[in-house]
Amino acid sequence: KDDYKETEEEEEEEERMRTATTMVGARPSRFGGSTTTTTFRALSNDSASEKISRRRFGGKRTQKQRRRMEERRGAGTMRANKAPASSASSSRSSVSSSDASREELLEEMEKLKKENATLKILEKQLDDAIKTSREEDEDEGDDETVEVVKTQTTVPKKKAKGNKKGSTPGTLRTDPKSESEIEWPLPITAEGCPVGEEGKKPFWEMRPKNDPDQLFLDDGKTKKTNEPIKISHVTAELAPLAKVGGLGDVTQGLGRAMKMQGHDVQVILPFYQSLDANEIFNLKHVMDFDVPKGMKWDGEDIVSMMKTSAYSGNIGGCDVILLKPHEEMNSNIFKGGAIYGGSYNELEAYLYFSRASLEYLDKSGRDPDVIHVHEWQTCAVPMLYWEEFSHGKTSLNKAKIVMTIHNLDNTGECREEEFFATGVNGKKFNVVEKALDERTIGHNPERMCLIKGGVVYANKVTTVSPTYAKETLDGNGGFMSQILRANQDKFSGVLNGIDYQLWNPALDATLPANFAPGNKMIENKRLCKKYLQIGLGLDVDETKPLIACISRLVPQKGIHLIERAVTQSETNGNQFVLLGSGHSDGGFKRMANEEFSQANSTNVRLMITYSDTLSRLMYAAADFVLVPSMFEPCGLTQMIAMRYGALPIVRSTGGLADTVIDCDADAKKWQRVRFLRRRRPIFRRMHSKSD
């Protein structure tokens, strides 16, 4: 467009330079030949002619050139005053000066006017096309190329907004035109190295990483709040760096969603030694402050001050505050190569972290409106806040506490003397009305339950799905069911969700071919399946159903059902790929080394590890994703599976029942899902009633 405008400006300036007052006719051109005059305006624009001269001849005019130009202008004006109306000079359009008539000149003028009008129309069409292209990009429409050539302009037809039949929604990061454009992986050995290239990383670790600058930006579609508030999350996990399970994904997605709505959101996180500081954007030291910490010294309880360092940065699109003991304290808190199970006492570390979070909020002057705590690791925050920090004792005077229970499998058992790590004697809380675990009454010693204390002290308590909330109230929460029933007026289930920017098969850089509903969903998903089959050394056969299972390997996740699915898939000639680890993974390690080793099976691969990149490749390749949990507060696996075009196979429990609708069990809801998915061919094909 810029080239087009510049060419038009040059022609207009050249035309104005060649005209004189009231002149209707022609005169010799400055640039050779002759040019028909097509305007009636007077022009004396030295700057314009200088500009054209410099463009055409690559420099300024000489003094001799300027003098000749002025002489020609004067002669042209005199000829215009003396010449009869019928006189004209010859032009490039074959109008001769000897026999040209007034009618021919006027006819030529009309032709040039029409050409000029055509150029104006093309310019307007070009502007409309570019505007349409931008609108379609905003609506996830196609990218159209507008090409401008000197003598030809290609303008696409304007399309209607939205994802209508016949349109191709979404822009794909990678869309190979043929299989030859894909760099296919080398199959891995039993040790995980590429065949013939021992010592090198496996293929999934060689895949490109997602660019945070593209994924973690405000999409501009989120509705902004008119009443922004300050929110401080206190959590033990945050994806993608400090992630072990779904807790990290939820806190990241929730923090980003609140931030995009216009709230002032900050996530307070332990600064684990295992975190790669180079992966934390804009990491910098903020302040050092003292945190009271209790300990036993020579048989007596004493409270000393632990110097603590606070760092700010950004992880996964969330503004974070990272806390850890100052280097000079020589403490082993949060030391080790893993988030959990490091070289430190987890209970002591998280009690210290809960107190340090409140001390930071007090000393930094943040004074949030909401403090949102997650899981047992941070349940001491509401207990300490209302007993030690509120009611004018500190600068924290307006905050309300929200507590989210992500899983009641671990309730945070704690003795009185262990709670003293917060600098506060646990005896204050070890009563039935507060945090005493009723199951330990009469035991020596009687113990506290941190989850119970959090429920009692928090202003609002949520869990991660409506069905799981109902199940816990109905008795499936163990002894906590009666505690939740007693606090039912402030307890509710709010369904988790996934961040559609972070889990987007159209832009996911880890995939060899991207796809979106209605845009290469079938073709490119087939390429992803072939890529995984080659990389894992499976039979390359697109007709074999590929079942994926991505899970922590613990009893809650239905270990016996996963084992059964592996053997049944092999028997039926299907393919099965497992990715996960946990304290119940021993049986799968044996299976991976024996009957389902690479030497014995070309349909099953058991990957006893975890990789975010490999999980994305598996979601994109899978036809089905298995989630056979015995109980599941919510679960994100089934949502990601559907996002990547795979059918989830789940047990009807907790959040799985809230997010996956069975077509046979609930025909009315199924019809509603079919209606909502009517524009997505992959769902229409795979969810047909005959299936």
Image (tube, helix red, strand yellow):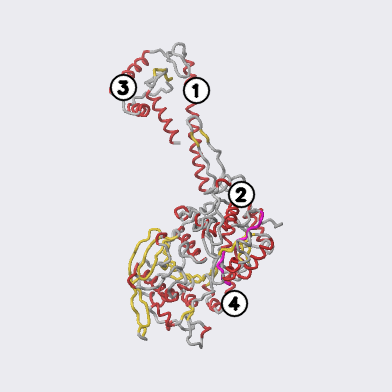
Which tag, 4 or 1, sits closer to the chain's start? Answer: 1
Q: Which residue is mark 3?
A: 65
Q: Amino acid at mark 3?
A: Gln
The residue under label 2 is: 523
Q: Residue furthest left?
A: 63
Element assignment for label 4: helix
Is 653 within the magenta? no
Number of numbered labels in the structure image: 4
Pointers 3 and 4 in contact (CB under 8 A)?
no
Which residue is at the front of the view, 37 or 32?
Answer: 32
Residue 546 sits inside the magenta stretch: yes
**Cα distance between the residues tagged 1 and 3:** 33 Å
Q: Residues within 10 Å of mark 2 (few under 14, many from 20)?
A: few
Residue lying farthest to the right in this orientation: 690
Question: Is 579 rendered above or below residue 110?
Answer: below
Q: Mark 2 to mark 4: distance in Å?
A: 47 Å
Indicate which label's residue lies in the foreground, 1 or 3. 3
Q: Amino acid at mark 4?
A: Gly
User: Seen in the image, is 546 located left or right of residue 121?
Assistant: right
Callout 2 secondary element: helix
The Cα–Cα distance between marks 3 and 4, rounded to whole angstroms, is 99 Å
Task: From the image, state whether disc 3 or disc 2 is nearer to you.
Answer: 2
* Tag 2–tag 1 contact (CB < 8 Å): no
Marked residue nearer the N-terminal end (1 or 3)? 3
The segment highlighted magenta reads 543-555
Image coords of residue 70 (percent x, y): 31, 20
- Report, in whole angstroms, how far the alpha carbon at label 4 lies from the one at label 1: 88 Å
Q: Which residue is mark 4?
A: 475
Q: Which residue in the protein does label 1 denote?
A: 111
